[in-house]
Image (tube, coloured by chain):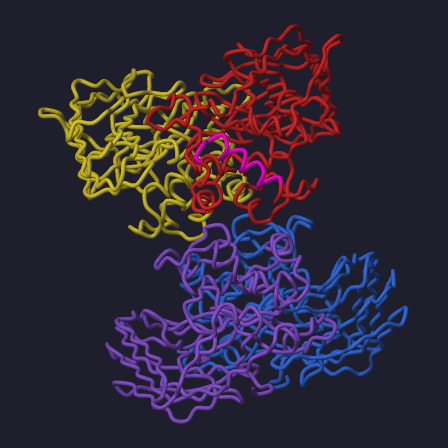
Chain colours: A blue, B purple, C yellow, D red
Amino acid sequence: MSLRFLVSCELQYDVEFPSTLILNIHPQCNAAQTIVEERLAIEPRIKVEEFTIVGSENRFLRLQTGKRKRLTIAYAGAVDCDYHLHEAEKIDSQTIAQMDRSAIPYLFPSRYCQSDRLSRMAWDHFGKYENPYDKVVAIVDWINGNVEYVRGSTTWETSAYDTVTQRTGVCRDFAHLGIAFCRALNIPARYFSGYAYQLQPPDFHACFEAYIGGRWLIFDATRLAHVNGLVRIGNGRDAADAAVASIFGRVRCRTMTVDCRLAPGQRYAPLGRKQLKRRGVSLDVGPVR
Amino acid sequence: MSLRFLVSCELQYDVEFPSTLILNIHPQCNAAQTIVEERLAIEPRIKVEEFTIVGSENRFLRLQTGKRKRLTIAYAGAVDCDYHLHEAEKIDSQTIAQMDRSAIPYLFPSRYCQSDRLSRMAWDHFGKYENPYDKVVAIVDWINGNVEYVRGSTTWETSAYDTVTQRTGVCRDFAHLGIAFCRALNIPARYFSGYAYQLQPPDFHACFEAYIGGRWLIFDATRLAHVNGLVRIGNGRDAADAAVASIFGRVRCRTMTVDCRLAPGQRYAPLGRKQLKRRGVSLDVGPVR
Amino acid sequence: MSLRFLVSCELQYDVEFPSTLILNIHPQCNAAQTIVEERLAIEPRIKVEEFTIVGSENRFLRLQTGKRKRLTIAYAGAVDCDYHLHEAEKIDSQTIAQMDRSAIPYLFPSRYCQSDRLSRMAWDHFGKYENPYDKVVAIVDWINGNVEYVRGSTTWETSAYDTVTQRTGVCRDFAHLGIAFCRALNIPARYFSGYAYQLQPPDFHACFEAYIGGRWLIFDATRLAHVNGLVRIGNGRDAADAAVASIFGRVRCRTMTVDCRLAPGQRYAPLGRKQLKRRGVSLDVGPVR
Amino acid sequence: MSLRFLVSCELQYDVEFPSTLILNIHPQCNAAQTIVEERLAIEPRIKVEEFTIVGSENRFLRLQTGKRKRLTIAYAGAVDCDYHLHEAEKIDSQTIAQMDRSAIPYLFPSRYCQSDRLSRMAWDHFGKYENPYDKVVAIVDWINGNVEYVRGSTTWETSAYDTVTQRTGVCRDFAHLGIAFCRALNIPARYFSGYAYQLQPPDFHACFEAYIGGRWLIFDATRLAHVNGLVRIGNGRDAADAAVASIFGRVRCRTMTVDCRLAPGQRYAPLGRKQLKRRGVSLDVGPVR
């Protein structure tokens, strides 16, 4: 299932003194996601570098503000995304012994996903499900049923260990808790940041991917976005790896607008919750349906 | 300065039921570290895979215990290490804007190094030093002066945020705190695990590297090992990435012996604390002295 | 229901240097609990003071070791306990507006019972029960069903905020979590330490009391003791207030034996779980049944 | 040294649904503090109860909002405070063995003062001072020098364990950290809330008292208030015991004004930092100088 999305964002910053920003707003460009066209405009002109880091497909921007006091970064792109559907019952349970080595780093705890401290709880709640896909569906159900989405209820320091008890958060927190539970169950899981079709209100979105049956399947415990309506920006162990903006210096975000819409002529069929019980969605290479 | 070390370890495990182990006991093999010869013996014979992961030079072993009840893994190698000395005063301060992109992931907080929560303390204590090398030397001094090495005082869950207040720990905890402080000061820092010459009692050792002036310089806040007497096994954001053993299943370590000695005919000159105030040591590629 | 218990304990300490101990091993003496006879023996003879603190009925011992190297404290007493049964359905829900002022301090968070951080979780899980007695029964059920009793799994620093996620603990941890949930629901709750009839293995026990319908009802989330087989030693906000031993100096507990048995001629009828669903037990003044 | 202060406050609340408030805004009335006159006005008329709790001199108000939507509470009083000065060098070091029993509960950790986790740090930093008064002066110096007063930097959940690392806070956090360090050193310490003369901006203030030489001496690590210009409202183990307002239900503070001024004809002589190095101030019964 291939869909073309038009994504865009505009970030405006106030700069107190010369600082460096690392932004992660470009969609990834890979076998499952083709950048048809894109445009980046930065006002005023400053030194900018686009780069990726070995072992990741995230496309970072490094900006030096110099002495500018206000900075506007506008990105727009047209992106073809190839979603793949996978029948849950055909997904093989895969042991760590069989797992592709590239997934192994995502088994370990990270800053915001202290899977090592959630182990017993994860096994108590989700250990009973045989199939790893069912395990992750149960995790998503649990988070969605027990954590309330409350804007402003958490900070940049909030981690899965907090969220599991405090029971409020935003998309980032829901993702971190999902990741932590998966890893606690020996299912590799990673953070997914992206543009999200029909997200209300429009914003950057975060959810997570679990490595099941040899693929990275997308899950969104907030249920605010369509998993087959996401344009991938970044991956990482958690938000520390895939922050929209990492600021070194003193810079304040003034305004931010984000948009994600279907390209003209595209037809969209969302996947319902029932369908997602039986079928997983991936945005990576695999058999096209 | 090139030195040949003979390193070895023997790990014995009791296996309760079929499990998977991921070990990280092989020295890295790269431009600064040459494996002259090595030998791995696993008793009884089981399925073993050696692998590395993109973006890392760590050499992992994946073992499936099958139904074996006892497992012995013995590694021995001869390794040539090229240490490089760098005059502190010639080390350029490097901004994030100039920094090699490969170092950037080591700016972000990780499971055991919550640099985001130590920021103000780090700047208060170490912000006054202009030169980044002096900053890290001050960090090492502070940790060594304020944290006591107490075997058994911490657990696998202990993180830099705990250690900074509890003031006890083992080499792993000293390393985590050093890393966290560096990152809080926008100095990339990573975990270093290795064999350590003359470490008493012999054991695997952990310390850290800070990315300064375009190189990874080694620091050991415990001062229990010689920084020019280390054979690198693993790097990572913290111990989660470079654990000697990650166990999936139920396996208990029965005995562990570790050894690191000079090869016959080698002469060793340790670097004193005064020398390290003015000169940093790296175990990566660079101008040989 | 009045029962006579013979309780005793013997504590042996090794003293490294002159220290002070505050012990809380004497049963309380009040309207519901009569000390028929008791005996305290301390070997060798040292300076001892027995005292209570205003606002509490705990009977503390303050001991100065002086230069003694070994200390043995033996307590034995015969205690008549008057348990009162209260029909759950007759227990009035009582608002904070009506509550006796003496219970108010037990509404607030304490060291090991961070009720302020468990608020949302408590209301989500237990808010649906109208009657406060049913709320606490549900809390006890939840803790008993979700937390495993694992000797040695926690330390003196472990608090309810940890236990709620880590899901293991000993009686102290079960009590702290029960207290924290109650307070989060605006039900005053306090720590209860005591001798426990038929506890296996024999030890000091901890559980908790919730202030419902104008009385302090006893609950034991471990279900290891009979709530009508407890002899009260201490109350407090949490274990910080009612520790068996608080040590100032360097003293190590060498051995500890605890015993609690029925006095000759007494007949005991334990209360089953079903009965406790409908009837609460208090060890304070109230209508005798 | 006796001074008459005129203190007042006005609190305005918006009430969402019938709730209970427990306020602690009345100055204590005891041997060192005489209420010359006072006036409480609550608009509109609702059910109000004034009470104290055994073991505390805090004067609480319990209010039931009923169906009122807006609530205004105004308190004004004239209070004579007897401050006592104590020469530091004459203050006897007092062991726990000698200490008045009423001080003992203030040795133990509490919700916001986890002295048990700060023990080693406290001894490392402050253990070298022989005299307990010097210890506490060093604590105050350390906090004042290492923690920055930043309005809005902390929340109701922030505790001493956080503040010691995060290094920002408000008066409440400074007090909690001071208390925690004292207790870690076996010096009883308690929370002090009050009206503060010349505090800018005017507000309720919090600081702490340490039990030294048989008295409760007042310390303010923020140095924003005069220790001999405080009118005591409440004491407790920490802010959980002496909150200005504890709300049960849904009520939002709309406005709050606080005032503390000298009564006409009074002359005020503040105590400088140098004087406080050599002399402690208490607001309890003792020899007048």
Q: In the picture shown, does residue A14 fall above or below B287?
A: above
Is B233 displayed left or right of A177 in the figure? Answer: left
State the image quarter where residue A206 is shown. bottom right
Is B123 displayed left or right of D214 in the figure? Answer: right
Is C106 displayed left or right of C220 in the figure? Answer: right
Comparing C217 with D176, the one in front is D176
Q: Any magenta on residue A23?
A: no
State the image quarter where residue B259 is shown. bottom left
Is B162 displayed left or right of D249 in the figure? Answer: left
Comparing A33 with C69, the one in front is C69
Q: In the picture shown, does residue C1 fall above or below C73?
A: above
Q: Residue furthest left?
A: C264
Q: In the picture shown, does residue C73 fall above or below C142?
A: above
Q: Residue furthest right?
A: A44
Number of disc labels: 0
Residue C107 is situated, as x and y percent measured from the top left of the image, at: 49, 29
Residue C195 is situated, as x and y percent measured from the top left of the image, at: 24, 32
Q: Quadrant of the N terminus of chain D?
A: top right
Residue B120 is situated, as x and y percent measured from the top left of the image, at: 64, 52
Q: Any magenta on residue D139?
A: yes
Residue A134 appears in the picture as rendered: no
Q: In the picture shown, does residue A30 fall above or below D41?
A: below
Q: Quadrant of the C terminus of chain D?
A: top right
Q: Residue furthest bottom?
A: B36
Helix, strand or loop for the magenta stretch, by majority: helix
Residue A184 appears in the picture as rendered: yes
Comparing B107 with A228, the one in front is B107
User: Which portion, as a residue range, is magenta?
Assistant: D130-144
Residue C254 is situated, as x and y percent measured from the top left of the image, at: 20, 43
Q: Residue furthest front?
A: B274
